[in-house]
Amino acid sequence: MQKLLISIFLMLALTMSHTVFATSDEEAADVAEETTEAAEAAEDTEAAEEKLESGLGWQLIRTMEMANSGKFVHMVLVEQSRYMDKTIYSNAITRLCQDEEDWCRVRFWSQERWVPEKVSMSPEQYQRLKADYLLNKTADMHQLRWSCRVDANSDNCME
């Protein structure tokens, strides 16, 4: 976010100097309009980033609906250096599922490049999945499965 703000200020400084040396009022107005549009786009991006949930050691990367079902999968990034800390997963699940009574799914990765762009995962993305939480009261399911790298002793670790 800090880089974004620096980029905005740099862009403003460059466009303002162009406005000063513009040859006509019309050209200066065009530059000012471009500057305003760029600043608004940067604010929209920043606002979208702020809406995403996060907590100590984790960040929600995206939430996607499963085929117009009204059921959503939360894709979460856990800090690489802390992916063995199970309290991080618990905190994320609690925060993301607090308003969900019947169904909630949260999936965790420790490297952003492996977080899928869609609900389905490639074999490589599945292999790098650190944990998968599912609450489905209709099917009487409530489970948290761990990657065997996080918890090899778990009864339901994922390979």
Image (cartoon, grey):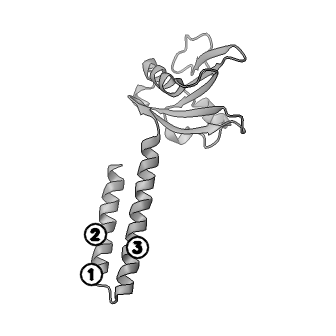
Q: Nearer the viewer, mark 1 or mark 3?
A: 3
- The amino acid on which the numbered mark 2 sits, given as a three-letter code, is Ala
Q: Nearer the viewer, mark 2 or mark 3?
A: 3
The correct choice, above or below, for 137 with respect to 128 in the image is above
Residue wearing tag 3? 33
Considering the image in quadrants, where does the C terminus appear? top right
The correct choice, above or below, for 45 with respect to 113 in the image is below
Residue toward you, 27 or 14? 27
How far apart are the two marked residues, 2 and 1, measured between alpha carbons? 11 Å
- The amino acid on which the numbered mark 3 sits, given as a three-letter code, is Glu
Question: How far from the left and from the top, in percent, is residue 6?
Answer: 30, 57
Task: Work out whether mark 2 precedes mark 3 in sequence or the reverse, and give the earlier one.
Answer: 2
Looking at this rendering, what residue extends furthest in the bottom direction? Answer: 23
Q: Give the residue at x 28% y 84%.
A: 21
Q: What is the secondary structure assignment of the residue under circle 3?
A: helix
**Label placed on residue 103:** none
Q: Residues within 10 Å of mark 2 (few under 14, many from 20)?
A: few
Residue wearing tag 1? 20
Image quarter for residue 153?
top right
Q: What is the secondary structure assignment of the residue under circle 1?
A: helix
Residue wearing tag 2? 13
Q: What is the secondary structure assignment of the residue under circle 2?
A: helix
Q: For the residues labelled 2 and 3, say whether their Cβ atoms are less than 8 Å apart.
A: no
